[in-house]
Structure formats: C-alpha cells, structure tokens
Image (cartoon, rainbow, N blue to C red):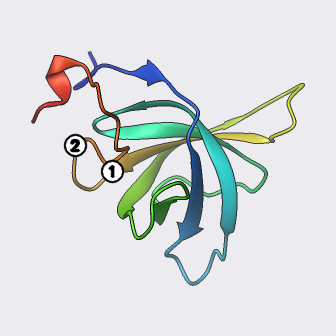
Amino acid sequence: MRRSTRIERQIRILVTSLDPGKRVCEECDTIALNAHGCGVRMQEKIPSGTRVLLDLLHMDKCSAKGVVIDVVPLENSEAKWLIGIELETAGNFWGLLEVPPDWNL
C-alpha cells in the first residue's frame, strides 16, 4: 500500500548524485510523483541506495534530498532507466496547487 497517492505528472528536474564515486548530473522528467517521492526516466543509471539532490527547474532555489530506491531498465524508450526516488522529507515539494488529501502530512 502506498503512503500517499501517486499522480502522473511530468515535471522537469535536475537529478544530481551526492555519491562522489558515482558522478551523475542529469536533467530529466518525472513520470509519476507523490508526497514521498517520484519516478524519473534517465539516460544514466544511478545505483539503488545512492543519495541524490533533486532541483525543480521551473522554480528557483527549490531542491530536496532523496535516495534511489528502485532501478528498472527501459526498453523501446529514449531514456534507458526508470529510477524510483524517495524524498528524505515527505510533502508537496513539487509545488502543486492541488494535491490529494493524503499529501497533507
């Protein structure tokens, strides 16, 4: 069971690995998000367990830390990986005006 309702929403973000051993910094789009995290399509693989920084590209100085919790290879897609990211702090990091009731933590 999900902790908060997942919605399909494409938001442009910058994902940066905080692991000095795995230098990745890539602009990508979310495909689904909720109050606890998101799924993004990426060209670069980021291993599960890697801490990351997410920056919303449509909002100045809006960032959050998270951790990669799932990595799935994609076939027949421009992007090569579906990366699941859990936010360190749950909430409406995404800046959406209307959110499901269970997002009000």
| Residue at 85%, 30% in the rendered image | 77
Tell me which corner region of the image, top left, top right, bottom left or bottom right, holds residue 16. bottom right
Q: Nearer the viewer, residue 9 or 70?
A: 9
x%, y% of residue 8?
A: 51, 21
Left or right of 44 on screen, residue 34: left
- Camera sees residue 51: no
- If the image is split into quadrants, where does the N terminus sit? top left
Amino acid at the residue labelled 1: Leu
Mark linked to residue 87: 1
x%, y% of residue 30?
A: 57, 38
| Residue at 59%, 60% in the rendered image | 14
Left or right of 68 on screen, residue 86: left
Mark linked to residue 4: none
Q: Judge whether 41 appears above or below 44 on screen.
A: above
| Residue that label 2 marks | 91
Crowdedness near tag 2: few (<14), some (14–19) or many (≥20) residues, C-alpha within 10 Å: some
The answer to whether mark 2 and mark 1 are in CB contact below 8 A is yes
Amino acid at the residue labelled 2: Gly
Crowdedness near tag 1: few (<14), some (14–19) or many (≥20) residues, C-alpha within 10 Å: many
Q: CA distance from mark 2 to mark 1?
A: 9 Å
Give the SS element for disc 2.
loop
Q: Judge whether 72 appears above or below 6 on screen.
A: below
